């Protein structure tokens, strides 16, 4: 009897069941998207990592790639459909900042599964039972996919893998939203797994802030063994990416990620529109440019020994709203001015409540008595209470009502840094300086900004005092000249 000749359907059926996930993506592309499939090494690399996640060789996966590089299509559309070919009982939860985005991808998965192409090859593997629901659909093997947002319901759902796709909108990466996202991750999302010891988690997002969800898990969940696939649009040799499952093959500084889709000319236009901050975050997957955002690394100056005599010495305090472990830091700094040069002399930085803050202000005042003049305290949060409590015993307290936002206040003093007139002690003499410099360079996208607030408050006061002194001296000179005449 003649052997039946294999058809394309037969071949692709076997590839889908036994081949790689990348093979499946390549075959399924035209059922989901129009136009040519522009394959690239980064697509294959992402596919390899998602295969490992499905097989249990990876349980925690972060994928940071620029927008427009197929991250949602791969993770939220093709991959869960491919997983059902291998195991129709697989259960997934997908969450984003917008439920409409997860619903969009759920419907694309449904369209893929219901397509004639898919049904001819694997229609016997499972059947959809309530695909009209979209946000919550099942198959006849008790597998399901649930789509929601980080502010949406999850109660009663327990999955095998959770996919987080852009949990924060790029334009809304505020401290409030960042905090909510982290608390949601550690609370609601943490308990939504069928078998916690075997569960999978995948986060795909653009880096928006040092303290976004990726920054949080990389710092706080080191024992979870997160595999981090970070692929910037332009290659940076200082930040190569390599995991146990593959690496970024680029070697030339600035080499493009996907030149067929994003050639240099077009990418440059995009970067111009985004600006350096958004380019670093969204295109390079770094929350701030390598050289700094508002404050540049090249502007940082150090001194070996502060001048023995200074025109003015002040304290500057940035207080917090709480005294809890989760609160911001209280920062007190001592600054000196000599002419148009400004020197950071000392710093206190700790998480503390009202009573401890008052005691630190007293201690720093005793340490620098009698050289220190004004004690600037921001008249907000615990600062207002500290002012009322201490003003009778510390007569030099000056309440400060900050004008404008943090960014505008920082921009107001960048000229002093750019001119090379701001100096820090060397790190070997003051170990806390390294953290302060890092906070300056990452502002306003850094995890903390308390030392920046204390510095901008001090420099604004000192610069205004220096300008007033210069104007007074100029008037005195004019008066003296008039007497001579």
Image (cartoon, helix red, strand yellow):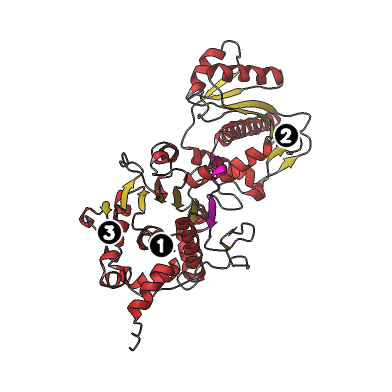
Q: Nearer the viewer, residue 241 or 208?
A: 241
Is the residue 163 above or below the residue 25 in the image?
above
The residues bearing labels 1 and 3 have C-alpha atoms spaced at a distance of 14 Å
Q: Nearer the viewer, residue 238 or 214?
A: 214
Q: Which residues are magenta?
A: 220-236
Q: Which mark is residue 107?
A: 3
Mark 1 / mark 2, whichever is N-terminal = 1
Asked whether residue 260 appears in the rendered view, the answer is yes
- The residue labelled by disc 2 is 430
Q: Nearer the viewer, residue 459 or 267?
A: 267
- The residue labelled by disc 1 is 74
Is the residue 60 above or below the residue 178 in the image?
below
Q: How far across and down, in percent of the image, does residue 387 sit?
A: 53, 17
Task: Report if residue 61 lies within the magenta region.
Answer: no
Q: Secondary structure at mark 3?
A: helix
Q: Which mark is residue 30?
A: none
Q: How far across and down, in percent of the image, does residue 241 sit?
A: 59, 59
The residues bearing labels 3 and 2 have C-alpha atoms spaced at a distance of 57 Å
Q: How far across and down, in percent of the image, does residue 226 sit?
A: 53, 49
Residue positioned 49% across, 55% down in the render: 64
Q: Secondary structure at mark 2?
A: loop
Circle 1 residues within 10 Å: few <14, some 14–19, many ≥20 = some
Mark 1 / mark 3, whichever is N-terminal = 1
């Amino acid at each position: 009897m003649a052997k039946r000749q294999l058809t394309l359907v037969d071949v692709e059926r076997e590839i889908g069941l036994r081949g790689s996930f990348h093979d499946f993506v390549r075959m399924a592309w035209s059922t989901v998207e129009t136009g040519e499939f522009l394959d690239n090494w980064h697509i294959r690399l992402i596919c390899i990592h998602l295969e490992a996640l499905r097989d249990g060789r990876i349980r925690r996966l972060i994928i940071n790639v620029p927008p427009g590089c197929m991250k949602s299509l791969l993770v939220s559309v093709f991959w869960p459909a491919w997983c059902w070919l291998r195991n129709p009982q697989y259960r997934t939860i997908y969450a984003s900042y917008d439920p409409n985005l997860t619903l969009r991808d759920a419907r694309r998965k449904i369209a893929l599964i219901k397509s004639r192409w898919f049904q001819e090859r694997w229609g016997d593997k499972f059947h959809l039972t309530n695909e009209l629901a979209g946000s919550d659909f099942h198959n006849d093997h008790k597998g399901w996919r649930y789509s929601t947002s980080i502010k949406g319901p999850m109660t009663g759902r327990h999955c095998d893998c959770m996919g987080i796709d852009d949990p924060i909108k790029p334009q809304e990466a505020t401290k409030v939203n960042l905090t909510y996202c982290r608390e949601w991750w550690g609370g609601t999302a943490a308990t939504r797994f069928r078998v916690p010891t075997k569960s999978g988690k995948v986060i795909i997002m653009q880096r928006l802030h040092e303290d976004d969800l990726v920054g949080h898990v990389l710092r706080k969940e080191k024992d979870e063994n997160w595999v981090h696939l970070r692929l910037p649009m332009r290659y940076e040799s200082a930040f190569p990416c390599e995991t146990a499952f593959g690496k970024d093959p680029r070697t030339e500084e600035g080499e493009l990620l996907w030149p067929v889709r994003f050639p240099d000319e077009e990418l440059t236009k995009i970067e111009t529109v985004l600006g350096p901050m958004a380019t670093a975050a969204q295109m390079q997957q770094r929350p701030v440019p390598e050289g700094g955002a508002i404050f540049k690394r090249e502007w940082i100056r150090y001194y070996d020994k502060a001048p023995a005599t200074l025109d003015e010495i002040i304290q500057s305090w940035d207080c917090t709203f709480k005294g809890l472990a989760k609160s911001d830091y209280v920062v007190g700094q001592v600054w000196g001015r000599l002419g148009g040069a400004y020197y950071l002399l000392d710093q206190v930085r700790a998480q503390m409540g009202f009573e401890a803050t008052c005691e630190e202000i007293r201690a720093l005042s005793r340490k620098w008595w009698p050289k220190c003049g004004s004690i600037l305290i921001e008249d907000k949060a615990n600062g207002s209470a500290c002012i009322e409590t201490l003003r009778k015993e510390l007569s030099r307290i000056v309440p400060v009502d900050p004008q404008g936002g943090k960014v505008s206040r920082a921009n107001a003093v960048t000229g002093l840094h750019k001119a090379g007139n701001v100096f820090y002690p060397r790190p070997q003499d003051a170990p806390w300086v390294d953290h302060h410099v890092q906070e300056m360079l990452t502002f306003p996208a850094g995890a903390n900004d308390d030392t920046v607030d204390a510095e901008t408050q001090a420099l604004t006061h000192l610069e205004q005092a220096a300008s007033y002194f210069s104007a007074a001296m100029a008037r005195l000179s004019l008066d003296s000249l008039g007497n001579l005449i």
